[in-house]
Image (tube, rainbow, N blue to C red):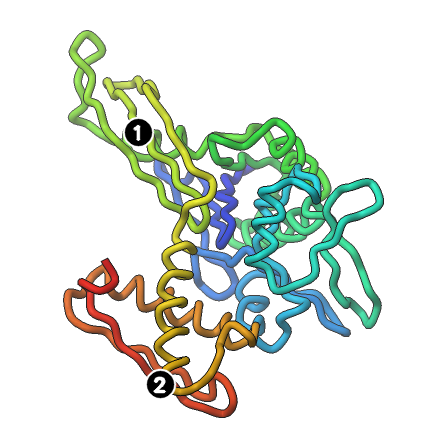
Amino acid sequence: MSVIGIDFGNDSCYVAVAKGGGIETLVNDYSLRATPTCIAFSPKNRILGVAAKSQQITNIKNTIFGFKRLLGRVYDDPLVQEEIKYLPFPVIRKENGLIGIQVNYLNETHVFTPEQCTAMLLTKLRETASVALQAPINDCVVSVPSYFTNAERIALLNATEIAGLHCLRLFNETTATALAYGIYKQDLPNVDEPPRNVVFVDMGHSALQVFVCAFNRGKLQIISCENDPNIGGRNIDCILADYFCEDFRKRYSINIKSNAKAYLRLLSEVEKLKKNMSVNNTSLCIGIECLMDDKDVNGSMKRDDME
């Protein structure tokens, strides 16, 4: 029976399996390897992943994301209070001080815990793997940030149990990255030779991890690891969005931050701009139809300005 590996990210997830002497990342029902960490609730059903992400703008209060960073924490935690600023849906304090995510589902108000939301997504990933491998999936290994606390790890284990998965191990993302680099390397020094030191910089959607590994053939050692759980790609997106908010305020007389849907659409566009800018040295443009007050907007940015 196959054991799947799950890369559970704050923005998207991946599922992989050892196959044919290598590691294969499985595709979902949209033929994509990345599945958005997103769940949408409606009066009729619940949808997950790509389908949930695609209707986020039209169902903003009932499409939830970012719940990974709420796992294993209490509502009054300063990190949670900071995180809520990024979330356009209601996050409430339950009677026991824990976190509740409030949505309208099947025409009723429901409050789910971050663990329950994570379990919903893991169930979807399990189904994706089962379809791709044409076999039932029961066992998994899940990657976690190196800075995850014991409470966060327990919460994630609880979520895998709710999803009907037996989690064999929680694997630090730093170790997983180092293994992915070194496992197939044929030119590493022998064990009796000085190791090859490699620095890895892992900037995710909402966190940054930097670590140094020493490699010998058949051996790796993590020498040092530093992280910042509050710096990630989304911070760059917010800076770019602020730039265009001010630009559009001056040129179109609109306050995008006063409209959650408009701001979410802008964030989506600047993320694309950021990714395209990484492979371009020229000026790139963005254009959004009917962004706010029935106004079409457009703007541009040079690589030097972004840097």
Residue furthest to the top: 192
Residue furthest to the bottom: 294
Residue 74 rendering spot, x and y as whole percentages:
70, 40
Q: Give the Cα separation between the discs numbered 2 and 1.
A: 53 Å
Nearest the camera: 59 or 138?
59
- Amino acid residing under circle 2: Arg
- Name the mark nearer the viewer: 2 or 1: 2
Nearest the camera: 180 or 52?
52
- Amino acid residing under circle 1: Ile
Q: Which mark is residue 294?
A: none
Nearest the camera: 115 or 264?
264
Which residue is located at x 56 percent, y 28 percent?
169
146 sits left or right of 305 in the view: right
Residue 9 rendering spot, x and y as whole percentages:
49, 47
Q: How many marks?
A: 2
Quarter where residue 152 is shown: top right
Q: Quadrant of the C terminus?
A: bottom left
Q: Secondary structure at mark 1?
A: loop
Q: Quadrant of the N terminus?
A: top right
Quarter where residue 110 is shown: bottom right
Classed neighbour count for the residue bearing mark 1: other residues with Cα under 10 Å, few (<14), some (14–19), many (≥20): some
Residue 80 rendering spot, x and y as whole percentages:
62, 46
Which residue is located at x 63 percent, y 37 percent?
156
Residue 140 rendering spot, x and y as whole percentages:
57, 36
- Of labels 2 and 1, earlier in sequence is 1
Q: Is residue 1 above or below residue 219?
A: below
Q: Is residue 227 above or below residue 30?
A: above
Q: Which mark is residue 251?
A: 2
Which residue is located at x 50 percent, y 85 percent?
292
Residue tagged by mark 1?
183
